[in-house]
Image (spheres, helix red, strand yellow):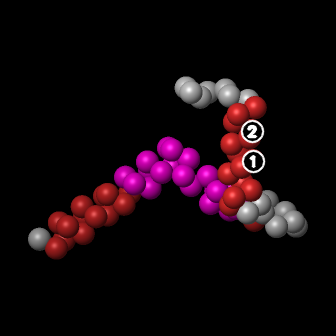
C-alpha cells in the first residue's frame, strides 16, 4: 500500500510542477538560472523586481493574453 501512495505522491508532484510551469510560477527560477548560466556580472533582479518588470512588460505589450 505504501508504494502505491508513494507513486501517487510522485505523480501528483510531477503534475503540480508541470502545471506551475504552464502557469509561469517558475519564471523567476528560470530567470535566475539563465542569468547565472549567461555569465552576467551584475546580480540578478530580486524576485519582487522581476515580477514587477514582467507585469509592466505584459501590460505595455498585451500580446497572447486573453484578458
Corner quadrant of residue 63: top right
Relative image position of residue 7 (x, y in whole percent):
25, 64
Question: Is residue 37 visible in this depiction of the protein?
Answer: no
Picture quarter containing residue 14? bottom left
Q: Where 34 falls versus 62 (above or below)?
A: below
Q: Which residue is mark 2?
A: 57
Q: Which residues are magenta?
A: 15-35
Give the left or right position of residue 10, taking residue 41 as reference. Answer: left
Near-viewer residue (64 or 33): 64
- Left or right? Give the position of 39 relative to 22: right
Q: Which residue is mark 1?
A: 53
Residue found 56% across the figure and 27% down from its top: 67
Q: Residue at x 82, y 67 (%)?
A: 43
Q: Nearer the viewer, residue 47 or 28?
A: 47
Residue at 11% across, 71% down: 1
Queried whether the magenta region covers residue 24, the answer comes back as yes
Amino acid at each position: 500500500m505504501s508504494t502505491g501512495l508513494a507513486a501517487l505522491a510522485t505523480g501528483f508532484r510531477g503534475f503540480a510542477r508541470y502545471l506551475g510551469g504552464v502557469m509561469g510560477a517558475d519564471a523567476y527560477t528560470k530567470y535566475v538560472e539563465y542569468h547565472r548560466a549567461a555569465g552576467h556580472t551584475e546580480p540578478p533582479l530580486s524576485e519582487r523586481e522581476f515580477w514587477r518588470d514582467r507585469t509592466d512588460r505584459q501590460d505595455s505589450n498585451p500580446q497572447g493574453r486573453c484578458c
